[in-house]
Each structure stands twice: as structure tokens, then as C-alpha cells.
Image (tube, rainbow, N blue to C red):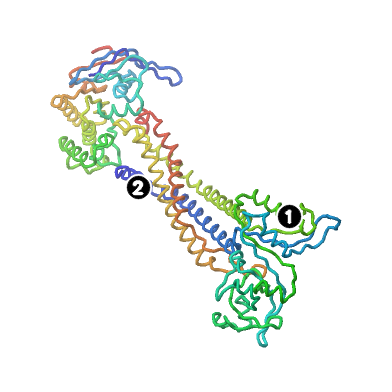
Amino acid sequence: MIELKDINKTYNNGQPLHVLKGIDLNIEQGEFVSIMGASGSGKSTLLNILGILDNYDSGTYHLNGTLIKNLTEKQAAAYRNRMIGFIFQSFNLISFKTAVENVELPLFYQGVPRRKRHELAMQYLEKLGLRDWAQHYPNEMSGGQKQRVAIARALITHPQIILADEPTGALDSKTSKEVMALLKELNRTEKITMVIVTHDSGVAAQTDRRIHISDGLIVND
Amino acid sequence: MKDLFVEIWESVRRNKLRTCLTGLAVSWGIFMLIVLLGAGNGLLNAFSEQGGTFATNSMMVGGGWTSKPYDGLAQGRRIVLDDKDIEVTRGKNFKGIVDKVASTVGASDTVVLGTKHVRGYIEGNFPARMEMEKIPLTHGRFINDKDITDQRKVVVLPDNMIRILFGEKVDLASVIGKRVKINNLQFQIVGIVRANEMQDNNLFYAPYTTVKTIYAKGKEIDDLTFTFHGLETEEENEAFEKNFKAIINKLHRAAPDDESAIWIWNRFTQNMQMNKASGILTIALWVLGIFTLLGGIVGVSNIMLITVKERTHEFGIRKAIGAAPGDISKLIITESIVITAFFGYIGMVLGMVACEILDATAGHNVTEVMGMQMQLLKNPTVGVDVALEATLLLIIAGTIAGFFPARKATKVRPIEALNAN
């Protein structure tokens, strides 16, 4: 599913910063993986490259057999839209849109008709127990609810992988557990590949495979 | 499409005051453009009303004074046109260009009715002159061919002279057929024209042959007018006039290149120049209006830049979940066009209302300038064509206003946009 070979990435902000120093990584379909590392270790950069939000300098990245390299913004957007679902620490919901409108948005960019995408979004919200909250705005919801809206938004396009960046980072411990349980269940029942970046070993412990990154290299898999 | 407008409404709704203030500048710009063009139209309409009283494909020719010695004669000699000139103008020299030729002779005289009398200028005319000079006949008829051949004593008087003779409240139509005395001869009134307010020399018309005989004018004529065709450019007209002068000058023993021996009033080139002048005026008004509008456009562009900056994070989210750069720029440019067009239309409607008010007030004011009755503005409004052009202008303006902000929004990489706050 995910094939990384010798990925290198250097940031050039004033002085060059070599963030990823040759990452080799294979993640199979249906895996439940966590990537751990201290801040500055390069784990977020790796996640951004996996999510086609950022490009890399050398090496190869194959996603589901497609080489992801030198894409135009338009192509990258299309791949992100169809193959990848994102879950962020700060939820990244659009504040002036209701829960259901937020969930609909990826389908809007696929050109799905309004009625159809509304129907689908309602199904996903129901699945995540948020049916009654569909017409609420993000600031009217709790952190756990917001993250579940975000998960619904990530799921609605049937992505091959879900990339989660500290999905529980802004949640209390009880809600964290619920969200992790939800992700685990989605992995088990829907067979969605799940990659979670975290520095919380408690979160990592719930995944099937733990990858440790330190100073731009994988040190422990 | 509906989704796009829902998005735009969501964005505008969050910044009502800001959007309205900026929109006001656009409204003002379009308002000024419409009012300027309306007033300009009024001015041009008033001009052409006053200047457009003759056939535009005609020239009037009259005698002048020589400006150089020639053929043994000194300069400063008066040239009087005569029958020979009519013949030559009609003749083979100008075949294919000159169509109809009509000449006039005239004299100052008094029209008498009982104890009432009014001084005026009796002008002997051919029937063709009515068309050439656009003589504004209101009642009866003009001179006809039979009047010419029979040397009938008939007269066409302006309404102001009729009122002096028959009283202020006279029914003009009832005057036709009545007789007046001119030069101690009975003349029958056959037609009435609208008096020319620009000149108060009480010009009235009688058959050419009649006037010539009564006032013993011999071969001499006052002026001659002819219609023509086939001279399309100013250069062609100039060349024709030069040639015409050379030929007529020779008949009067004046130098062929003498510019002032005879004068030519070419209504065609005059009209051409007037059209050119009005074209320049219209362009100048558009430029003024567009510059006024420019302030509004810069405002909209500015607001869109701020909006883009504020929404960077949101655009980052959209990009992460699959919005292509085109989706984002479409959003911004459409928002810009909608704001510009919406407020522009308000300005346009207000501008048109202002034009109507102008029409209802100043549009009917007749001002007296140096003893002449003048209407400064006539129908100072704009047509559908201007409204359509202004609409097109607004859409272009909106696109331009949205273009740079949109480019800025699409240039930010998704990861930077997501991290922005």
C-alpha cells in the first residue's frame, strides 16, 4: 500500500535542515500503524509527505502502486481527495459550516450532487453517533464530537489510508480512549489502513505496529 | 453553481460592514460613470438638435472677396455669384458627384397686412432647397415647380411673423390662403415654417423666379446649395472643394488658388468633425468614469486580499481534503465579481434615476445665451447599450479585482496554509 524508498527531505530556511535522512518504509493494506518520535524528529514531515501535503527531495514514494512525485497541485489535490483521509490534532473543521456541511465537503470537490452528498454525510454522522448534531456548528460541540465529525469527513470518500496527526492530542483521556477505540474498530471492520503520528506511548500501545523515528531515521520498527 | 453562491454568501455574511463600505466605492464609480455619460449624451443631443437642421450631404457656396491680384485685377474685389456658376456646378465638371443644385436670391423687405407690418428678408428659393436645408415646414406646402415656372406670387412665412401680422392667438392653419402685401404686391401665404430661434432676421421664402423678377436681380444670385455623393473622406472633400474653387474662381477672373474669392460651407465634413468631436467627448467621459470606478476596484481587490489572508487556514483545510487550486481561485474571483456586480448594479440604477431627474429638471430648461434661446441638455439619459457595456465593465473589473488575491491564495502550499493561523 505505502512504499517509501530512501526518502530525503531538507528544509532550506536560512541554513539547510536535513529532516528526513533516508526513510525506507512499507505499510501493507489494512495495517494499524503508529509513528512515534520526539518533536523535531521528522515524524510530522513524514506524515505530510505520506499525505501529499509536502514534497520530498529524493527517493520514491508509491501509494497504492502510483508513484507520488513531482505532481502538480491539481493532481495532488485529486489524489488527496480520493486516496487519503486526514485527521488532525486541532480537528481542522471549517468553523462557519455545520457538522454535516463539513462532512460533505470532500464530496463537493468530487462533484457529487448536493442531495447525494448530504445523504451520505448524514449516514456517516449517524454511524459515528452524531445524527442529532448534524446542524450544529463546530464551536457548539465538544472536542470528542468535533474529532468524530473530522473522522466522518475522512471516511466519506472511502480512502485507502487514513493519516492521523496526534488525533487525541487535544482531547481528555476519556475521550482519547473513545476516539482510539473508534479508529481501531474502523481498521478492523472496514479494513482501512491507518497511520497515526503521536508522541503518546499510551496511544501507540493500542496500535499493531510501532515505528520510532529519531533524527530523521527509523530507529525501531 | 448554487453551492458556489452559498459559499460566497457565507463569506460575505461574516464581513457585512467591510463588504458594504467597499461596495459603496464601486457603486459610486458606476454612478459617476452613468451620470457623466448621461449628461454627455444630453449635451450632444442638444448640440445636434441645434446644428442638425440641414442635409448633411450638401454644400453651400457664396461669393467673397479676392485675396490676391490676378489677371490684371487688384485684390479685395467682391465676387458675386451668378447664373453661370449654377450652370457650371450642374455641368460636366462635377458629373457623378453633384446631384441637385439650388440657388437663392433675396432682399430685405417688409410684409404688410392692413396696418400691421414686419421687416424681414425675402429669399427666392427652389423646391429642392427645402430638403437640402431641412426647412421645418409645419403647415401648408413649400415652393413647388409650378410656382417657379409661373413666377407665382406665393410666400412661406415663419410662425413668429404670422403672429405679428395676425395676432398672438391666431390659428396657424387658418392663415394658409390669406394674402399679405410685399413690395406693394399681393402674395398668397401657402406655407408656414417654424421660426429659427438661433437667428432673428425673419427669413421667409418665395419662388426663386418671382423674387428675381420683382427685385430685378439680373443674373446675380446670393448663394447656391447643392447635394452631392461619393465623397467619403475629409481628403476627398478637401480635394473636391479645391477643384471647385479653382473652376468657379476662373469664371470670376480670380486666382484659381484664391481661398477667399468664394466660400464653401461643407455640411458633410462639418458633420464628420462633429461626430469626431462627440466621439472624443464620449471616450473622455468613459475614461473619467472608469478612473472613478478604479478606486472602487482597488478597494474590492484590497478587501479580497484581506479575506484571502484571513481564510488561509480554511483554504489549507480545503486543499488537504481535495480542493484543487482552480476551486479556490474560482471561489475568490466569483466572490469578487459578485460584490462588484451587486454594488455596481445599485450604482447603475441610482445613476439612471439621477439621469431621469436631470432630464425632468435641467433637461427642459431653456437658457438664454446672448439673446439666443438654447437648451443646454436634451434627453440626458443612457441607453440599454451603455447599461450592457457597464455590466461587461463590472464583470471585467470584478475579475481583475479578484485575480491577484486568487493567485495569492493558490500559491500558498497546503502545508503552509494548514499551519497558518
Which callout, 2 or 1, points at the residue further toward the start of the chain?
A: 2
User: What residue is drawn where x is 46% and y is 50%?
Assistant: B389
| Of residues B180 and A198, the one drawn nearer to the viewer in this rendering | B180
Give the position of the N terminus of chain A as an image quadrant.
Answer: top left
Nearer-the-camera pick, B265 or B99: B99
Q: Is residue B209 above or below residue B24?
A: below
Q: Which residue is mark 1?
A: B247
Query: In the image, residue A217 lies at what x, y percent?
Result: 31, 13
Establish if B35 lies above or below A166.
Answer: below
Q: Position of residue A130 (x, y in %)?
A: 18, 39
Q: Which element is circle 1 on?
A: helix
Judge from the rendering whether residue B420 lies leftward or rightward of residue B58; answer left or right.
left
Indicate the secondary structure of the residue bearing disc 2.
helix
Locate residue A61, reporting x and y percent.
30, 17
The answer as to whether the residues below labels 2 and 1 share one chain is: yes
Q: Amino acid at mark 2?
A: Arg
In the displayed structure image, the side of residue A122 where residue B354 appears, left or right: right
**Residue type at mark 1?**
Ile
Q: Numbered disc 1: what chain? A: B
Q: Quadrant of residue B214?
A: bottom right
Q: Say which residue appears at 69% left-offset and 76% top-offset.
A: B120
Give the residue pinned by disc 2. B13
- For label 1, the crowd category at 10 Å Cα-Cα, with few meaning under 14, some 14 to 19 and many 20 or more, is some
